[in-house]
Image (cartoon, rainbow, N blue to C red):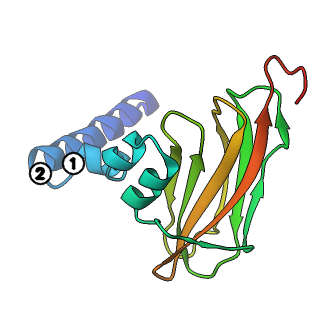
Amino acid sequence: MNQLRRTFLKGTSAAGTIAVAIAAGLLKPGQVLAAEWNKVAFGATTTADAMKDIGVGGAAESKDILIKAPDIAENGAVVPVEVTSKIPGTTAIMIFVDKNQNPLIANFELSNGTEPYISTRIKMANTSFVRVAVKAGGKAYTASKEVKVTIGGCGG
């Protein structure tokens, strides 16, 4: 059998199976691609409101949350941030930037056995605290680090 024909038939049969599952209501594309969007929390204009809306209001300070970010960011459009939680049973890591128009930057939901480590790039409008909240064992914990944003990379 011709290899191209075989590849074509495999692809069309897989696409057909997925189309039937969608039509039957067994597979919903929106649910597969992303978790449910918390529009209220991501639309909040203060860190306190965003933390309350996402369920981590009143979080306790913890030294077991490690934030690796530059002390001075030369470009606020791409600030590298790494977060590691040493708290057992971590199920979510959230990143906030206090002085951004919408402080909630990201919400990472972690499944069982996932290493509680996040590495991403965030956008910062001004010098501000980068605040991280962690959910673990039904409780909420937080840590923060100040990051100075320079204009044009000219210093503090």
On the image, the x and y values in percent for residue 133 come to 57, 62
Residue, disc 2 = 25
> Vertically, is 109 above or below 125?
below
Residue situated in front as seen by the camera: 12 or 46: 46
Disc 2 marks a residue whose amino acid type is Gly
Pointer 1 residue: 28
Above or below, 69 against 133 in this view is above
- Number of the label disc, if any, that sits on residue 14: none
Q: Residues within 10 Å of mark 2 (few under 14, many from 20)?
A: few
Q: Is residue 8 left or right of residue 153?
A: left
Q: In the image, residue 6 lies at what x, y percent?
A: 38, 36
Q: Secondary structure at mark 1?
A: loop
Q: Quadrant location of residue 83? A: bottom right
Q: Write the residue at 50% across / 83% down.
A: 137
Instruction: Answer yes or no: is residue 152 visible.
Output: yes
Q: Is the C-beta separation of discs 2 and 1 under 8 Å?
A: yes
Q: Would you say 83 lies left or right of 103 here?
A: right
